[in-house]
Structures are given as structure tokens and as C-alpha cells.
Image (cartoon, helix red, strand yellow):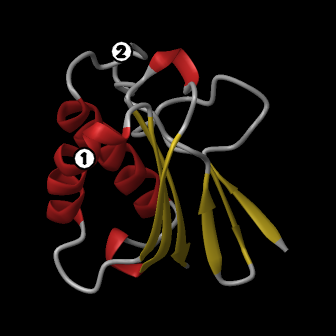
Amino acid sequence: MREIIATEKGPKAIGPYSQAVKAGGFIFTAGQVAFDPATGNLVEGEVAVQTARVLDNLKAIVEAAGSSLDRAVKATVYLKDMNDFAAMNEVYARYFPAKPPARSTVEAARLPRDVRVEIDLIVLA
């Protein structure tokens, strides 16, 4: 069984995908970028600003699914520029202060709307 997760507290999907899917005891989020769910607009700014917005969006989606960031088991971070790693990592660490999930971080040639960062999570339901 799978359950589609949708919340107004996270950005609306801009294509044929769900914000998240709960299945098999896990929550799989779609990759999130720095859209402000209240306005639908992209949050401009450096990678630190965008990372905070992305993680706030993920937090809202995971909580709508009945879980929390502290139950995350895997994160994938896509950066427009690997030189942004330290700034992204500083913000990321504030959201996962203890027992952070396993993580992969890669530089991507191009991200949606030319954002600086995109993150997806797998979280225990």
C-alpha cells in the first residue's frame, strides 16, 4: 500500500509528481528546491538561504506524513556548484544536529529553475 502525501505547508508540485509517498514503512520525498510555499516564488539568494528554505519545505512535508526530520535515514543533496558545499553543510547541520542521516552530495550540471541546491529524503514513517 502507498499513500500520497500533500500539504499546503510545502511547495505545490510543478509537474506530474507527489510531494512525497509513504510506502513500506518509509516516506520518500520528491526533490525539493527553494520555493516559498506561501507565494509559490523561488527564494533568491545564496546557497545558505536556499538550503534553509529547502529544509523547511522538507520538514513540513515529512511532518504532514506523520514523521519528523530526526527519523530521516538517507538524504541526497544536489549542488549547482560544489564550492557551495561548506555553506550548505553549515545550514544542513542545524536541521540534523544529532544522528544525521546517511547522505550523498553531488554537483549537478543544472537544477530546476537554476537553483543552487535541491534535496530529497527517505524518512522512517
SS for tag 1? Answer: helix
Query: What's the amino acid at mark 2?
Result: Thr
Location of mark 2 (residue): 39
- How far across and how far down the image is residue 76, in percent? 51, 58
The residue shown at (60%, 68%) is 27
Q: Position of residue 36 (x, y in %)?
A: 34, 25
State the residue lying farthest toward the front. Answer: 83
How crowded pointer 1 is (Cα within 10 Å; few <14, some 14-19, many 20+) is rated as many
**Residue indicated by mark 1:** 88
**The furthest residue to the right:** 1
Residue, x 79% and y 31% (percent of image)?
A: 16
Badge 1 vs badge 2, beta-carbon distance below 8 Å: no
Q: Is residue 72 above or below residue 82?
A: below
Q: Is residue 74 above or below residue 86?
A: below
N-terminal label among 1 and 2 = 2
Of 24 and 54, nearer the camera is 54
Left or right, 10 with respect to 125, comes to left
As drawn, 64 above or below 1 = above
Q: In which quarter of the image is residue 112?
A: top right
Q: Which of the two marks, 1 or 2, is nearer to us in this view?
A: 1
The label shown at residue 65 is none
- Inspect the image, locate mark 1, and give the three-letter code of the amino acid beneath it: Met
Where is residue 97 drawn, in percent x and y?
A: 16, 75
Secondary-structure class at tag 2: loop
Q: How far apart are marks 1 and 2 (CA)?
A: 23 Å
> Across the whole image, how many numbered discs are drawn on residues?
2
The image quadrant where one finds the N terminus is: bottom right
Q: Residue 69's image quarter?
A: bottom left
Q: In which quarter of the image is residue 96?
A: bottom left
